[in-house]
Image (tube, coloured by chain):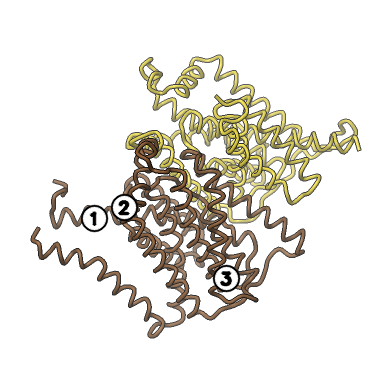
Chain colours: A brown, B yellow
Amino acid sequence: MKPGRAYLQKLGGPGLTLMALALLATFPLYASVYSMTLLTDILMFVVLALSWALFSAPTGYISLAPAAFFGVGIYTSAILGRQWPLLLTIALGGAISFCLALLVGALTLRLKGIYFAMFTFGLVELIKHFWLWFEIRFTGTRGRFVAVVDQQTIYFTMLASFVLLLLTTHLIRRSRWGLALRSIGECEEAAAHIGVNVNALKTITFAISAIFMGAAGAIIATRWTYVDPYIAFNPLYSFMAVLMALFGGMGHPYGPVLGAAIFAYLEEVLLTRFPYYYMLIFGVVLIITVLYLPEGLIGLMMRIRRRVVGGPDAPA
Amino acid sequence: MVTTIIEVVITGLLMGGLYALIAVGLSLQYGVARILNISHGEFIMLGGLTTWSLYTALGVNPLLSLAICGPLAFALGFVIHRTLFKRLLDTAASPGVFESNSMLAAFGLMFIIQNVALIAWGSEIRGYSYLTTPVHFLGTLFGANRLLTFGMALLIGLVFYLFLNLTRTGKAIRAAAQDPTTAGLMGVNINHMLALCFGLGAAMAGVGGVLISMCYPVHGVMGLEYTVIAIIVVVLGGLGSIPGSFMGGFILGLVGSIVTFLEPGLALVAYYVIFILLLLIRPTGLLGR
């Protein structure tokens, strides 16, 4: 490969990202309110999938807890949204999720593989049923109304949390921290032997990923106007985050972004009219991804590109 | 007071029998085939809804449905393992990777089966009344259908236990559970055994669904709740242990009926608290290896 082209490619990644972000930042100036709310939804799923991948992609631990942190954020907004300024509510939603994830991570990240997945799944259901009981018992109602915020503010706060998450992902991946996380995914015992503080690292990364899930929940709750525990702690959000990240591919930060964008758009088009068919497609794609696309869409694209462009590890 | 206690205990045990049966199926699928089958509850739902259709449309006795749904669910499970999970097993780099991938694939199956059922049967809650004659027992009252399902659950569990311990196939299954490689070297057809186990697990879920539909209303989205209960019972009793599953089922049934009596909203919370404490303190379960 010529040096000039390598330089262009090196510049191409961040340059394209900046251009896309500039486009997103100015989007409300020329787009309709409908497309802005659609884009907010897409960004919400992007945040969920990308923050899931932040912890689970390098370490290989399948967490089904996103719905728990997402729901915690939603309820932070529902309880405090009327008295507190929006940004403070969002920050608090992230902070509470962070603390919960620290606690959960410290307790459970010793569990291997499938047991961790089961535990995190149980966590969502535990919080949901406990909270339902608590609400009915002590407040007398099932659900709550959330203070409404205008669409543009929701859009920009969601975009801001996406940008922050993208930055965090990038910084972690490029640092020794990211390297240590990947070594845990490769072989946890070996990682511990070469001096990686395995448990601390897993727990703190898990907690950082939870911040963004909590923040996304706190933001989107202001658009839902009404929430109850079944809406807020819906395990579907965990499954969505996992599927979107897997389908997009976890070898590159843009994989989950791509997967989330595609499915969030599909949901918008299909869910209201053909809800069962949407979920059916969801299941089929999940199986196809697990069977045939272990590296997701982005892996497939890179493989095709290598075949077209050629390169050191191009398939024959 | 004494009557109340007896009633709570019996209700718990009756429920526990059903819990145990569906847990035995899951235990077989995870304990031998290493597949945490999240779609387990969907086979229960299929069994229940098929029984409802047969009963309301054709007047087929639910007991006869047992003989229809069991083999059908077995065939479905067997084929799914032969096509889907076999391929995953062949391509997985390590047992850990297979466990994660097969769980994710089972999630996909869950969505597919659930939504096919919702398209076919709709989202209404379906119920029929069968054998609801009250039976007096120690000063309490129970529907005959409850006692019948309890008896059937115990019977099926016992037959299966004997099958595992007394037959040649049962021995092969136990060998495959202990050490698939060595069992394969001794001439056990491992792929066949794994598919057999997955099919048998599915059959038990289907049969469990038939029994559940005799006592409770059934609907398209009931599956996940039973999957979760089965997972908790399996973790409680220890993987791959049938007596463990029955013990776990009874314990969970009892806890459920006691908590429901004291504070109705907290039964599911109690299940999850047990589950989470167990995972933290003794992940191998009460009778686990």
Q: Residues within 10 Å of mark 3 (few under 14, many from 20)?
A: many
Distance from label 3 to label 1 (Cα)? 40 Å
Quarter holding residue B227: top right
| Residue A222, percent from left and from top | 57, 73
Q: Earlier in the sequence, mark 2 or mark 3?
A: 3
| Residue A48, percent from left and from top | 46, 60
Q: Residues within 10 Å of mark 2 (few under 14, many from 20)?
A: some
Horizontal placement of A205 versus A248: left or right?
right
For disc 1, the marked residue is: A302
Distance from label 2 to label 3 (Cα)? 33 Å
Q: Earlier in the sequence, mark 1 or mark 2?
A: 2
Three-letter residue code for mark 3: Thr
Three-letter residue code for mark 1: Met
Please, what secondary structure does the residue beneath circle 3 have?
helix
On screen, B138 above or below A174? Answer: above
Q: Which mark is residue A251?
A: 2
Horizontal placement of B213 versus A56: left or right?
right
Horizontal placement of A140 versus B91: left or right?
right
For disc 3, the marked residue is: A89
Q: Nearer the viewer, residue B100 or B20?
A: B100
Three-letter residue code for mark 2: Gly
Given the current orientation, which residue lies at the most extreme left position? A2
Horizontal placement of B191 versus A74: left or right?
left
Contact check, label 1 and label 2, Cβ < 8 Å: yes
Given the current orientation, which residue lies at the most extreme front position? A195
Quarter holding residue B67: top right
Which residue appears at 52% of the width and 43% of the height? B38
